[in-house]
Amino acid sequence: MKKSNIFLGIIIFLVFLIQGILTLSHYGLNWDETAHYLRGQAYARYFLTGKTDYTDLPKIRSHYPTNKDAVLPDVKFEDDSFFRRSIYQYDREGEKFTFPYYIKHDKGHPPLNGILASFSNMLFYQKFGLIGDIESYHLFTIFVSSVLAASVFLFVAHFYGKFAAIIATLSLALYPLFFSESHFNIKDPVEVTFYSLTLFTFYIGIIKDKWKWIIASGIFAGFALGTKFNIIFTGFTIALWFVIYYWKSIKRLSWPFSKSMSISLVLFPFIAFSILYASWPYLWQNPSNIMNTLSYYSEIGIFSYQPHSYYFFGVNTYALQWILFTTPLIILLYCFFGIFYVLKHGVSEKNKLAIFIFLWLLVPIIRVSFFKTGIYGGLRQIMEFMPAMAILAGLGAAEIAKLLSGYIVKRFKQFNNLTIKQFNLVQIGIIVLFIPLVLKLIDIHPHQNVYFNTLIGGLEGAKNKNFADWGLTLGSSYKEGVDWLNENAEKNAKLSLIRGLHANIPRTTLRRDIDLDNRYYSGSKKNGEYIIEVTDYRWNIDIAREIRDYLETLLPVYEVKVDGVAILTIWKNDKKHLKTNY
């Protein structure tokens, strides 16, 4: 690999990482995060110290007063971490959230991502205090996302050149959902990074006949498997590509691999599953517990989440529509020409890389488009398609530059001897077209994950059409609401959610005298509590009509808006904030 490519790859890694660190505090929590961190801390503590409980940790005082009239001073506690408060607040006996608890009661996704994020918290917050509590967990996510951005550049630059690599990297890094959720989504950006590294290293290993790359791919697959089971679907991409790449060998019924490659391919799944087993103590007591996880995936994956209007001749078009309406138009355009490149040159390529990337794009989308399969909450559950789309966008942009340069030569005689400098100007022009997207991401910061493009009329158009899951932040928008309350709520204010759980607003993020409890919701009694809630697509589904109708009588005191659409609202439930017509 060229030294210049490695240098640029390091620059890309640092730029993405630095911007992520500088903006980490702007983003809130994903609803799923708290459960991952509590479990991750228990496992991480065991791996590092061998301790299975928290009996050696000093007790901390509860935030809550012992009687309703008591006032707590606004002072720092000895240990003000989200994790320690959670142990005390939700489990006074110290039995829950411990190692024995999880190896008996664990379920759902594997824990490796939560463990690694907890290591980050232990090092950068608990040990050295270099970064905030919640931000230290998120540092792990932005780090692996930065690795992915750099890896996409290095891979594409090696096979297709720097220009295609730059466009591919920009298409991934500026994809609104990826950019936003790389700051706080503990599962999907982590999974897509390990998923991509698995495919990158596997492809290189095969075409270069290097068994070490296959072993590396098995290790990355293990890290992906320890995060989510989505990595299993790389098997379809690889199998289909194998048929195309080794078609001549298949027709001759000859084995195409050397002895060392054959051994590495046999070891591949054992390496991956060994990492899963070693990182998940839940499997230690009974390896068959993995069947519980497989059952969990079948329950959430083989299910119809959307109305019948999203089905077309039995095909679930939800994912396709989300891609069409939430992918920036410039990336859609370049990706379209990338697919054109695949159709034109894919078969003729010696190593069939363009076909490999195209299959990578298709598999995650197709798997959620069958009848009775699906996803919810947008595209975050199939983010694995994004690096493939970004790479195709890079190929498409390179194809546009080539076609455009050819057109200029034919159309304008003075350019018959098109120079390298003039060709570079064409490439610069293609890169410049990303500027409007950058400005848009800045405009809607930090809520890039609710971005919709102009094909549907932005977020406002998606709301007006009641497009499934518009405005769904999965809880990250609570952050701005909490910041407003910390600045503006009166002393000893009461606060209630009407849909979310307390885990959506960690106590460590809320001013100490503000008392959060959903029981404070008083409805028409108007006891003066604040009410905070996300106001997205699920509003009319998850909130009782009686409560929705009542809140319509109140004037919001604060709203978080994107494209003029409120995605979170705070009300003050008193007579002063009644609408005049009520």
Image (cartoon, rainbow, N blue to C red):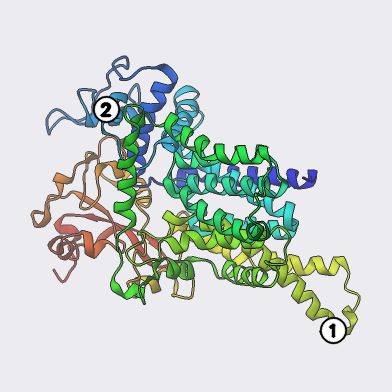
Mark 2 element type: helix
Give the position of the C terminus as an image quadrant: bottom left
Residue 171 visible in image: no
Residue 435 visible in image: yes
Q: Horizontal and vertical percent for residue 12?
A: 66, 47
Establish if 435 lies above or below 408: above
Q: Horizontal and vertical percent for residue 136?
A: 47, 34
Q: Given contact means CB atoms under 8 Å apart, are the residues at marks 1 and 2 in contact?
A: no
Can you name the residue that lies furthest to the left here? Answer: 525
Dot 1 surroundings within 10 Å: few (below 14), some, or many (20 or more)? few
Left or right, 545 with reference to 346: left
Can you name the residue that lies furthest to the top here? Answer: 56
Q: Horizontal and vertical percent for residue 232?
A: 46, 48
Q: Which residue is mark 2?
A: 101
Establish if 315 lies above or below 10: below
Give the position of the N terminus as an image quadrant: top right
Establish if 409 lies above or below 251: below
**Foreground residue, 581 or 383?**
383
Q: Horizontal and vertical percent for residue 199?
A: 59, 49
Q: Earlier in the sequence, mark 1 or mark 2?
A: 2
Mark 1 element type: loop
- Check disc 1 and give the amino acid type: Phe
Q: Rounded to the nearest whole Å, what is the CA distance between mark 1 and mark 2?
A: 74 Å
Question: Which residue appears at 39% of the width and 21% of the height?
Answer: 46
Question: Which residue appears at 90% of the width and 79% of the height?
Answer: 416
Left or right, 326 with reference to 18: left
**Foreground residue, 425 or 550?**
425
- Check disc 2 and give the amino acid type: Tyr
Question: Which residue appears at 69% of the width and 49% of the height?
Answer: 154
Q: Which mark is residue 412?
A: 1
